[in-house]
Image (cartoon, helix red, strand yellow):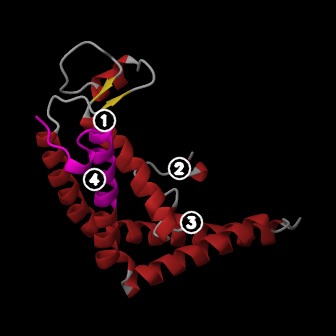
């Protein structure tokens, strides 16, 4: 059976608050690790500056009034292509730079998830206010006995908390990706010129 913090032992939402609290603490630890390994380094700061600069330059180049002359339009298109390729390259470098801390953060999250899984194995930690669709039900009811679809397992609550808390914490601390690097994730926007 799961053990709860003695202060919350008689509280109705003790397990839920414990999972949310641990998720918040884990997000703080992960962001501290990221700050130590990434955000405080001069390499990151210079990459972020170059991405911001290229994104602003690209934005101003695209918003300028197009000229009617064909030669000016071609040279402007070439300049835009150069800035876009520079922006993509800087974004790729930033992603590779963040990769090393990603491994450490993944290890921390894996250990915390294992700990929480052993503490709350087979225990309902929350009640969903809706009946989830089948694919969500498989995630939310993972490892629980019974047929009540509104029962929520620790894994689902921890997943939701981790995603939302860490993302908002990154925005609050100013660690969110640079504006120009937003499309440089796992699934970047396709380049319309290649079609």
Q: Name the residue: 17% across, 37% down.
A: 120
Q: Quick check: marks 1 and 4 in contact, CB under 8 Å?
A: no
Q: Determine if residue 5 is in view.
A: no
Q: Quadrant of residue 195?
A: top right
Residue 22 covered by magenta stretch: yes
For label 1, the residue is 156
In screen coordinates, is 1 left or right of 20? left
Residue 40 covered by magenta stretch: no
Q: Which mark is residue 113?
A: none
Nearest to viewer (mark 1 / mark 2): 1
Image vertical order of residue 23 relative to residue 45, above or below? above
Q: Earlier in the sequence, mark 1 or mark 4?
A: 4
- Residue 102 drawn at (x, y percent): 27, 62
Nearest to viewer (mark 1 / mark 3): 1
Q: Earlier in the sequence, mark 1 or mark 2?
A: 1
For label 3, the residue is 180
Q: Earlier in the sequence, mark 2 or mark 4?
A: 4
Task: Say which of 31 and 182 sits in front.
Answer: 31
What residue range appears in magenta? 1-27
């Amino acid at each position: 059976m799961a053990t709860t913090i003695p202060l919350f032992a008689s509280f109705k939402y003790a397990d839920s608050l414990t999972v949310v609290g641990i998720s918040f603490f884990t997000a703080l630890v992960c962001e501290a690790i990221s700050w130590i390994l990434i955000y405080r380094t001069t390499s990151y700061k210079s990459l972020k500056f170059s991405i911001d600069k290229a994104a602003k330059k690209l934005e101003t180049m695209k918003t300028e009034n197009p000229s009617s002359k064909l030669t000016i339009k071609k040279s402007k298109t070439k300049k835009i292509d150069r800035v876009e390729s520079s922006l993509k390259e800087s974004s790729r470098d930033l992603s590779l730079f963040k990769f090393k801390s990603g491994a450490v953060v993944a290890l921390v999250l894996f250990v915390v998830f294992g700990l929480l899984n052993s503490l709350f194995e087979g225990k309902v930690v929350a009640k969903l206010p809706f009946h989830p669709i089948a694919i969500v039900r498989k995630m939310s009811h993972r490892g629980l006995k019974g047929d009540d679809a509104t029962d929520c397992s620790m894994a689902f609550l921890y997943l939701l908390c981790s995603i939302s808390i860490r993302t908002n914490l990154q925005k609050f601390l100013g660690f969110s990706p640079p504006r120009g690097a937003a499309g440089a994730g796992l699934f970047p926007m396709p380049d319309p010129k290649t079609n």
